[in-house]
Amino acid sequence: MNQHTLLAQEWQTLQCDHEQYEKLALFIKIAGLVLCLAGLAFGLPIRWTAFVVALCWLLEGVFKTYQARLGGRLLRVEHLLRQEKPGQEAMQLNTEWSLQRPGAQKLVLSYAASACRPTVTLPYLPLLLALGCEYYFSMV
């Protein structure tokens, strides 16, 4: 197979995986909403319901970090496809990631940064605020 064919196959695989992470993130959002509403409906302690919502939020942040890694490689593959340079550049996702992999502290910070993106934060913050209001009014 030639370089262009390999890169095209890699791009297609990465693009499908990238979209799959987006679907998983949406599923996590829906699960967080359902679990929050179920917790409120069944009168579970607010702290446990809030803990489950926060776990969903964190989990989505991790998935979004994985998705961002794929996105970086997708950009690289697209660049190579435009250039059609000779040499075997295809299928180097893990190699490139290992060269760019930050230490533990920076990795945790990248997870936190992904979790703080507006598209990730938006569903969880109102849920946590609603739980806080529920808790406040139950104490008054």
Image (spheres, rainbow, N blue to C red):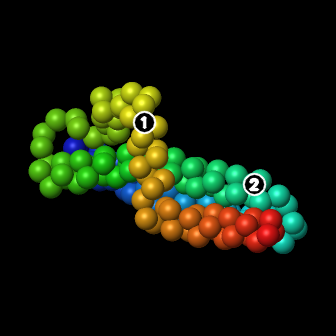
Residue 21 falls left or right of residue 126: left
Labels 2 and 1: the sequence-earlier one: 2
Q: Residues within 10 Å of mark 2 (few under 14, many from 20)?
A: few
Residue 36 visible in the shown view? yes
- Regarding mark 1 in the picture, which secondary structure is present there? helix
What residue is shown with label 1? 107
Numbered disc total: 2
Identify the image quadrant of the N terminus.
top left
| Circles 2 and 1 in contact, beta carbons < 8 Å | no
Going by the numbered disc 1, the residue's amino acid type is Leu
- Regarding mark 2 in the picture, which secondary structure is present there? helix
Quarter occupied by residue 78:
bottom left
- The answer to whether 105 is drawn above or below residue 66 in the figure is above
**How far apart are labels 2 and 1 at the CA level?**
28 Å
- The answer to whether 42 is drawn above or below residue 53 in the figure is below
Going by the numbered disc 2, the residue's amino acid type is Arg
What residue is shown with label 2? 47
Which residue is rendered at x = 42% and y = 31% of the image? 105
Residue 37 visible in the shown view? no
Q: Position of residue 55 (x, y in %)?
A: 64, 50
Q: Position of residue 111 (x, y in %)?
A: 46, 44
Which residue is rendered at x = 87% and y = 66% of the image? 43
Identify the image quadrant of the C terminus.
bottom right
Which residue is rendered at x = 35% and y = 48% of the image? 10
